[in-house]
Amino acid sequence: MTRPARRPTQRSRDALLLELASRLTPRDRWLLAMLHEHQVLTRRQVTRLCFDGDRQTRMRLATLHQLGVLDRVHPNYSLVAAPLHYILGTAGAAILAAERGITVQDLGYRRDRLHALAHGVRLAHLIATNSLFAAWVHASRARPEGSGLVAWWSERRAADTWGRIVRPDGYGVWVDGTRRLDVMVEVDRGTEPLSRVLAKLPAYSRLAVTSGIVTPLLIWLPTARRETNLRAALRTSPSGVTIITAAPGPLTTPDPDADDEADLASAQAVWLPLHATRRTDLDGLTRRYGTPLHPTRPLEPTPPGGDPDDPDPAPHPRPPVLRQRGR
């Protein structure tokens, strides 16, 4: 008679988790937190965020997948097969929860929902948004600690903070020298009428009135023609809103092998304020619209309405190995 297999005890599960966690580097743990925050990342995005080359990325992601801390999917959301996409795996969620002293349920992890997202209609938009921010992280990697992109909030976190008024695709803080620029981001993929884009703007005006702080709104568009049409439709910004647009164009130098829609061009001098005539990069926007940093107080990348004591803060956009080297 065959005996039924014994279920693992809590002690054995803890031992397995401890053994698994011992094989993870600080960069691995940071990547788990980034996937928890931003839900889905492509291999190209992971390379831009924290590796020096595609081969290194492939090898480490394969190992993390074998360990069960990452899941990978291969969706089709365009005319060609999409690259491998990575989401947080069950073991990765357990490690994150253990590090934070909470349960996986309290972490809000649902493997089924992540897989549904990775094959759903919202995936392409999420990937485009994450590509935009990943390009900004990549542009920050050669900078010293405390400059470049120092905060990156997901749509979910932004909605938790401002969802009663606006739901931006992301929020970020860019630092250049002695100034910081807080920005809201909207990524337009050209899949809806411009009237839908325009209809979102009055809510940003209400947010400016509510918070008392004008946070520039950066709108990334898929083509130069659509950007031109949007700017013609705008003519004037809603009260309290600084609108800045950009799109890939012939004057930019995007990565020719990019497999994501928003690419490295977004960190270049492509951003054009509504009433300006010259495009600039994020440093230029920071000098024009940013606020001075306190000369002695440490930078707290928390926006108006955010909770500086949040027990589940967003991970720093740059991995610890790079920050420790001051790169």
Image (tube, rainbow, N blue to C red):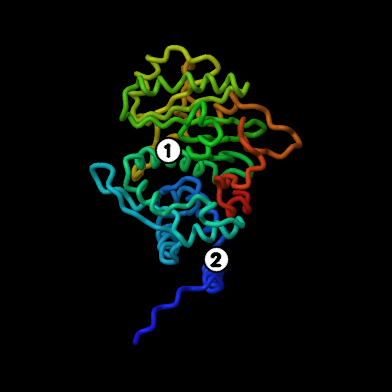
Residue that carries the numbered disc 2 in the rendered image: 21
Quadrant where the N terminus is found in the figure:
bottom left
Q: Earlier in the sequence, mark 2 or mark 1?
A: 2
The disc placed on residue 255 is: none
Mark 2 vs mark 1, CA separation in Å: 30 Å
Please tell me whether mark 1 sits on a helix, a strand or a loop.
helix
Q: Quadrant of residue 89?
A: bottom left
- Kindly identify the residue that appears in the image at 48 percent across and 31 percent down: 167
Residue that carries the numbered disc 1 in the rendered image: 129
Look at the picture and state if 56 lies above or below 236: below
Question: Farthest top residue?
Answer: 235
Look at the picture and state if 66 lies above or below 175: below
Three-letter amino acid code at disc 1? Thr
CB of mark 2 within 8 Å of CB of mark 1? Answer: no
Q: Quadrant of residue 67?
A: bottom left
Question: Farthest left residue?
Answer: 79
Q: Nearer the viewer, residue 83 or 186?
A: 186
Name the spot of residue 267 as percent of width and height, x first.
48, 35
Question: Farthest front residue?
Answer: 1
Q: Nearer the viewer, residue 106 or 199?
A: 106
Relative horizontal placement of residue 326, taking residue 120 as reference (left or right) = right
Name the spot of residue 281 as percent of width and height, x first.
50, 30
Three-letter amino acid code at disc 2? Ala
Name the spot of residue 7 as percent of width and height, x first.
45, 74
Name the spot of residue 94 as percent of width and height, x first.
51, 60
Mark 1 Cα-neighbour bin, 10 Å: few <14, some 14–19, many ≥20: many
- Kindly identify the residue that appears in the image at 57 percent across and 35 percent down: 174
Please tell me whether mark 2 sits on a helix, a strand or a loop.
helix
- Kindly identify the residue that appears in the image at 53 percent across and 74 percent down: 12
Q: Nearer the viewer, residue 8 or 159?
A: 8
